[in-house]
Amino acid sequence: MKITEKTRLHDAIKSSPNVLKVLEKYGLDCAGCKGAAEETIEKLAVNNGLDVKTLIKELNRS
């Protein structure tokens, strides 16, 4: 699965266990987040002050 800006966080996490490792690198505990089912990768990045393109590249490499 290719992760994009519009990919829901929950779907990204389900796609690879390494996604959680990338998110943890940024101090994000997304596995327990209530918004994981609805929040997109883009929203996650913006809300946490992360560069969207960099995050997506890292997630797709995982």
Image (cartoon, rainbow, N blue to C red):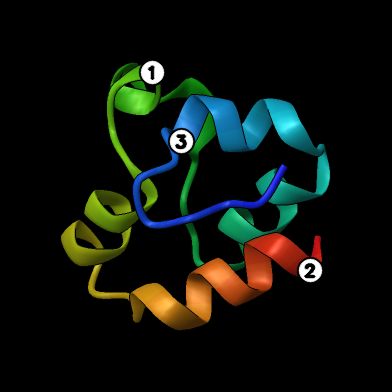
The amino acid type, in three-letter code, at marker 3 is Leu
What amino acid is found at the position of numbered circle 1 in the picture? Ala
Tag 3 near tag 2, CB within 8 Å? no
Q: Which mark is residue 37?
A: 1
Do tag 1 and tag 3 residues touch (Cβ < 8 Å)?
yes
Q: Is residue 17 left or right of residue 28?
A: right
Q: Secondary structure at mark 1?
A: helix
Residue 54 appears left or right of 25: left
Whole-number angstrom distance, CA of label 1 to CA of label 2: 22 Å
* CA neighbours of label 2 inside 10 A, class few (<14), some (14 to 19), many (20+): few
Q: Is residue 34 above or below residue 49?
A: above
Relative depth, front residue between 29 and 49: 49
How far apart are the two marked residues, 1 and 3, measured between alpha carbons? 6 Å
Residue behind mark 2: 61
Q: Is 33 placed above or below 39 here?
A: above
Q: Percent position (x, y) of residue 35?
A: 28, 23
Instruction: Using the image, tell me which numbered label, if any, was put on residue 9.
Output: 3
What residue is at 36 percent from the left and 73 percent from the top? Answer: 52
Q: Residue at x 48, y 55 (%)?
A: 4
Assign a secondary structure to mark 2.
helix
Please state the horizontal and vertical placement of residue 8, each as a whole percent of the image: 41, 33
Q: Which badge, 3 or 2, comes first in the chain's sequence? A: 3
Q: Which amino acid type is shown beneath numbered disc 2? A: Arg
Q: Which mark is residue 22?
A: none
